[in-house]
């Protein structure tokens, strides 16, 4: 993966004439956009900062739109709930904003003729994205070079996240008809080389495990890891412990890297060695709060945070 398109909200809308702001709301004009280009982990990023709307408002609009679609197809049309005028105006502005972003990407693609947007991974700051495995490996390798806590780790604790059903990541596509103005679920196409959750985790772990002296996989599917554990022992003499999550789990008191591939976090969080670093590969708000509460003294690293810093702060 060489390209990424990032959509994110900005804290405040630029100061403009109040009359202009009122007219924009009344007419349903697109939200103001701030464009940004940068490179993170050798991935070229096109960023679009959306001003004047919060992540919570976007999620509310998406849920309401999905609910209306279900009610429209149901037999009980009379019971459908109507959105208020303010939310309908917000929805118009939001749809037109997405349409403008797509038009700009199409124009850019035609100008440079690179096909850049055809296979770009879409990152939306208001969604809990699952990043492609190659991006996760680049993040891990970068942390090994730049972070002393990761570099000196002797023990690996790998938190398997396969058990939670997830939506597959989608790529931004410009192949839909020119007449369409609003981005819908049908506008995303699944990459041909998309890996399922189980394969992603196996590929990632197979690339990193050999540098550690101790390894523990916390998983609800220990049998699925039997072939990997046998290979690790035969090739490197590494004995990999596969155990189910429990608040009673204990770990050797070693310098430790914790790699979390899951969405919810684990019960054993409080038992991680004090000399650890937490590498979160699937950021969610709820899990981040649990990590802060239970592992507050452990340094925390996240690919999501790296992207946010590059886009919002310009670092």
Image (spheres, rainbow, N blue to C red):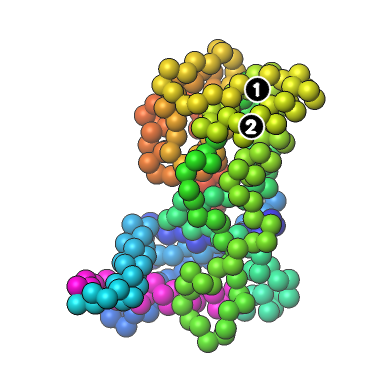
Query: Dot 1: what SS?
Result: strand
Q: Is residue 226 left or right of residue 65?
A: right
Numbered range of the magenta stretch: 79-106
Q: Residue at coordinates 23% horizontally, 74% vertically from top-left? A: 76
Residue farthest to the top, as pictured: 253
Q: Is residue 59 above or below residue 87?
A: above
Q: Residue at coordinates 70% horizontally, 31% vertically from top-left? A: 227
Q: Which mark is residue 240?
A: 1
Locate the N terminus by quadrant: bottom right
Q: Are marks 1 and 2 in contact (CB under 8 Å)?
A: yes
Q: Is residue 214 above or below residue 21?
A: above
Percent of width and height locating residue 96: 42, 77
Q: Which mark is residue 311?
A: none
Q: Which residue is mark 2?
A: 225
Can residue 211 be seen at all in this image of the molecule? no
Q: Is residue 118 above or below residue 182?
A: above
Mark nearer the viewer, 1 or 2: 2
Percent of width and height locating residue 152: 66, 22
Query: Dot 2: what SS?
Result: helix
Can residue 49 be seen at all in this image of the molecule? yes
Q: Is residue 101 magenta?
A: yes
Q: Is residue 246 magenta?
A: no
Percent of width and height locating residue 270: 42, 22
Q: Residue at coordinates 40% horizontally, 44% vertically from top-left? A: 285
Q: Is residue 203 above or below residue 14?
A: above
Query: Crowding near pointer 1: few (<14 within 10 Å), some, many (20+)?
Result: many
Distance between the alpha carbons at the discs numbered 1 and 2: 10 Å
């Amino acid at each position: 993966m060489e390209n990424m398109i990032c959509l994110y909200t900005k804290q405040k809308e630029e100061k403009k004439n109040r009359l202009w702001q009122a007219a924009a709301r009344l007419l349903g004009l697109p939200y103001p956009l701030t464009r940004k280009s940068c490179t993170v982990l050798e991935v070229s990023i096109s960023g679009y900062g959306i001003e004047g709307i919060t992540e919570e408002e976007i999620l509310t609009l998406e849920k309401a739109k999905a609910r209306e679609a279900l009610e429209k197809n149901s037999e009980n049309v009379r019971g459908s709930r109507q959105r208020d005028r303010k939310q309908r105006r917000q929805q118009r502005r939001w749809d037109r904003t997405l349409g403008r972003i797509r038009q700009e990407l199409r124009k850019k693609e035609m100008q440079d003729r690179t096909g850049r947007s055809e296979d770009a991974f879409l990152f939306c700051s208001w969604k809990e994205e699952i990043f492609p495995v190659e991006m996760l490996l680049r993040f891990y390798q970068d942390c090994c070079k730049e972070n002393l806590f990761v570099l000196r780790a002797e023990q690996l604790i790998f938190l398997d996240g396969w058990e939670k059903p997830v939506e597959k990541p989608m790529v931004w596509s410009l192949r839909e008809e020119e007449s369409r103005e609003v981005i819908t679920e049908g506008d995303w196409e699944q990459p041909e080389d998309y890996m399922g959750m189980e394969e992603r985790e196996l590929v990632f772990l197979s690339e990193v495990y050999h540098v550690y002296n101790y390894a523990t996989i916390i998983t609800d599917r220990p049998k699925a890891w039997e072939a990997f554990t046998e290979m690790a022992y035969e090739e490197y003499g590494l004995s990999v412990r596969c155990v189910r999550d429990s608040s009673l789990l204990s770990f050797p008191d070693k310098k430790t890297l914790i790699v979390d591939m899951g969405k919810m976090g684990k019960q054993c969080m409080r038992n991680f060695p004090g000399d650890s670093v937490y590498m979160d590969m699937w950021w969610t708000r709820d899990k981040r709060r649990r990590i802060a509460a239970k592992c507050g003294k452990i340094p925390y690293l996240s690919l999501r945070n790296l992207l946010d810093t590059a886009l919002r702060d310009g670092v």
